[in-house]
């Protein structure tokens, strides 16, 4: 029924709201004929963004990307125009992230990624030691698993010290 009403309103032309002003709650986004009718009323780029919203960014879509589109106010888009704007922004951000991930990495960036990885490893060692201390108290250092943790942390610390000038510059 909503589809028939929407198509009728769209055919009236002058009385119809601009396609960007149509409330998403008034249309069945699961009906591809309705989506196509709205998309055809939009500028080409807006039509692509709207189709992407319906196919990738709508939670009920079979190809849902898994991340809801929310505006700056934290709300989901209410109109076709808002959906287009949010989808276009998300798609541009995804394209930028993809291009960034494909650009060659310089030595400093590679060193920073290695630094971050080593820091995460060290944090995991500290967490393991903390769990041992919580479970065994002062006797934790006597446990057989304590010594390998200490050795691994010392190894990581040596690597971090050696990498520090490369990652943060020689002035630090």
Image (tube, helix red, strand yellow):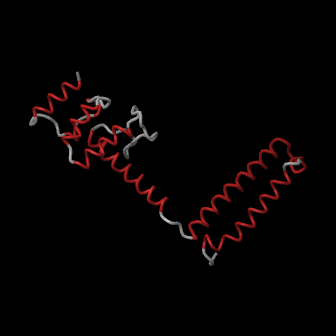
Closer to us: 114 or 17: 114
Closer to us: 154 or 7: 7
Q: Is residue 134 left or right of residue 2?
A: right
Q: Position of residue 71 (x, y in %)?
A: 37, 44
Q: Is residue 128 left or right of residue 53?
A: right
Closer to us: 94 or 131: 94
Q: Quadrant of the C terminus?
A: bottom right
Residue visible at 66% across and 70% down in the picture: 164
- Residue 115 vs 52, above or below: the answer is below
Q: How many marks?
A: 0
Q: Is residue 102 left or right of residue 32?
A: right
Q: Position of residue 50 (x, y in %)?
A: 29, 42
Looking at this view, name the residue that lies furthest to the bottom: 171
Q: Which quadrant would residue 95 be assigned to in this image?
A: bottom left
Q: Is residue 172 left or right of residue 24?
A: right
Residue visible at 59% across and 66% down in the picture: 110
Looking at this view, name the residue that lies furthest to the top: 1
- Residue 1 vs 98, above or below: the answer is above
Q: Position of residue 36 (x, y in %)?
A: 24, 36
Q: Which quadrant would residue 39 be assigned to in this image?
A: top left
Q: Quadrant of the N terminus?
A: top left
- Residue 105 vs 36, above or below: the answer is below
Q: Position of residue 9 (x, y in %)?
A: 14, 30
Report if residue 75 is visible in the image: no
Report if residue 37 is visible in the image: yes
């Amino acid at each position: 029924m909503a589809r028939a009403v929407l198509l009728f309103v769209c055919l009236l032309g002058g009385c119809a709201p601009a396609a960007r002003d149509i409330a998403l709650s008034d249309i069945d986004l699961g009906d591809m004929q309705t989506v196509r009718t709205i998309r055809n009323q939009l500028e080409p780029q807006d039509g692509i963004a709207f189709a992407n919203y319906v196919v990738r960014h709508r939670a009920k879509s079979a190809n849902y990307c898994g991340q809801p589109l929310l505006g700056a106010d934290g709300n989901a888009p209410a109109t076709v125009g808002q959906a287009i704007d949010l989808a276009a922004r998300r798609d541009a951000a995804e394209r930028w992230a993809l291009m960034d991930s494909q650009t060659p990495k310089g030595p400093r960036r590679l060193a920073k990624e290695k630094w971050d990885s080593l820091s995460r490893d060290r944090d995991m060692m500290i967490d393991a030691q903390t769990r041992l201390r919580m479970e065994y108290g002062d006797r934790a250092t006597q446990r057989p698993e304590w010594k390998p943790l200490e050795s691994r942390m010392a190894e990581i610390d040596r690597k971090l010290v050696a990498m520090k000038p490369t990652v943060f510059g020689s002035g630090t």
